[in-house]
Image: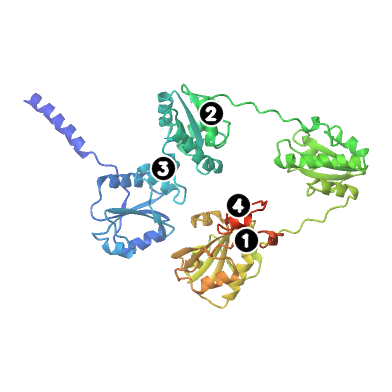
Amino acid sequence: MNISIYPCFVLLLVFGREGLASKPQSFVETVSDSKDWKKILRTRTNVLVLYTKGKVKNEIASVFADVSRELRGTATLIQIDCVGEGKKLCKKNRVEPISYILKHYKDGDFHKDYDRKETVQSMVTFLRDPSGDLPWDEDPNGEDVTHINDIQSLNKLLKREKSFMMMFYAPWCGFCKRLKPDYSSAATELKTTHVLAAMDVNKPENAQARIKYNITGFPTLIYFENGAPKYTYEGENNKAGIVSFMKEPGPAQEKPKEDLWSDVPSDVVHLTDSTFHTFLKTHSSVMVMFYAPWCGHCKKMKPEFTSAAATLKEKSINGKLAAVDATKEKKLGSEFGVKGYPTLKYFKDGEFAFDVSSLREKDKIVEFMLNPKEPPPPPPPEKPWSEIDSAVVHLDEENFKQFLKKKKHVLVMFYAPWCGHCKKAKPEFISAAEHFADDPKVEFAAIDCTLYQQLCSLNDVRGYPTFKYFNYYKNTKPYNGGRTETDFVSFMSDPENPLSGSPPPPPSPEEEWNSLAGSEYLQHLTAATFDSFLQNKVVLVMVHSLQSYEE
């Protein structure tokens, strides 16, 4: 009797354990009360909301729950039912989902509708960098590139494909961004015969691949064959170069070695640690160029310096031009404090006299050697804008939000001190601020993005200057209007007008060229005048387009 019951008991126990297995915990928060919603916006900086119309389909609910687990502590995921208890909240937020809709909120404000793939990986990538570019593997133009997301996928690719090209890249890398369209286009052209793959090795989980294949710069393109690297691609960074290589893979052609400057006959005297001081003792007037062979500015200056040395000899001008390879003669570089290339120093009667690094052209060098005089000191550094007395309020990370929350109308200029367009707009912006100095409702503010990079990044600043209008901080819109005092004053006189701050009309060709010398001799042609003007004439025509660029 006991023997027959015992196995039945064991089976029941097993089934019982199976039935008690719990589902992974979800950290999706359900919100329906306006007070709770306001508290979330006030205390959470990275919020993704799933607005639903009743019960949501299992697929998106499951993805949302998985994301909440993976990003717990990094992002907040919330569900609001717009036909249930959250109906009033949805109406207040002006959301009416047909089935469901995803919206992102950043730093207490609506940021954007979620517009990427509804997968765990895509949502996680987005929430880790909500202002970042669209991931390459989600870009329709890159659909023919084989995107490798982890080491396991890479190992499978190595086993599956006899040969392929791999581009190891980082999303932030400028060179990578420029190469992506050509690489994607090459992948499309070759998709029936060759595999072009890509792997983001900036991800911590892909560090193993970065180390294994010695990826020290981005992008690095490696051709694999039989599961191992065979060639590093060093050809042209364009579609044609990549396609040509894939059709006939091979080692990079050796670049012809550049002759050492000291081996090329010229009137420049090349000095070393052992000959430097002896030479200076026997020559009363010497200009020395400290250089590095790889330095682009040095290469550009070499022919000017060489030609100037020849002119000194030809015209019997007192003085010598000498050069020192500071990468070899390190003792001299250290002795004279050489920290950049090229560095030019003038020596008189065997002793260092002064720096002359501003002399880069043949004529200027020859002119100087005719009558060596110490150049005037450089102008003092420009005073920081924040130290100049004006009606513009200078904000930082501590007072930004607090200041804007108290002000009805604020126009903020995000700038960089070195930016030419910013320098041009600054006096106009200051004058406009003075115009409203007695109006407590209107303020003009500025933020130096070289000092407060994170603050500028959070406000989607991608070029300088960037202008944004704030109304009690919560309401904001970009300002794309003109950059004169009149333009700023006109906008801030009626900032809530939908047409305010619109881009100004483009200048006419005549206006665009008027500031240039000789513009009065130019004939600006149109489709209507082109043929008649060219009749029976020999004409040089420049075809151009009017563009404006942000720095």
**Residue 54 found in image quarter:** bottom left
Q: Amino acid at mark 2?
A: Phe
Residue 529 to residue 368: above or below:
below
Query: Could you say which is closer to the camera, residue 534 or residue 148?
Result: 534
**Residue 329 found in image quarter:** top right
Residue designated by label 2: 245
Q: Secondary structure at mark 4?
A: loop
Q: Are marks 4 and 2 in contact (CB under 8 Å)?
A: no
Residue designated by label 1: 512
Query: Could you say which is closer to the camera, residue 251 or residue 172?
Result: 251
Q: Secondary structure at mark 3?
A: helix
Residue 299, x across and y down, in percent: 73, 39
Q: Amino acid at mark 3?
A: Pro
Binning the other alpha carbons within 10 Å of mark 4 as few (below 14), some (14 to 19) or many (20 upward) gives few
Residue 146, x across and y down, in percent: 42, 34
Nearer the observer, disc 3 or disc 4? 4
Nearer the observer, disc 4 or disc 2? 4
Q: Secondary structure at mark 1?
A: helix
Q: How far apart, in angstroms, are the residues tagged by discs 3 and 1?
A: 38 Å
Q: How far apart, in angstroms, are the residues tagged by discs 3 and 4?
A: 33 Å
Q: Residue at x 80, y 44 (%)?
A: 344
Binning the other alpha carbons within 10 Å of mark 3 as few (below 14), some (14 to 19) or many (20 upward) gives few
Q: Are marks 3 and 1 in contact (CB under 8 Å)?
A: no
Residue designated by label 4: 543
Direction from residue 365 to residue 282 in the image, left or right = right
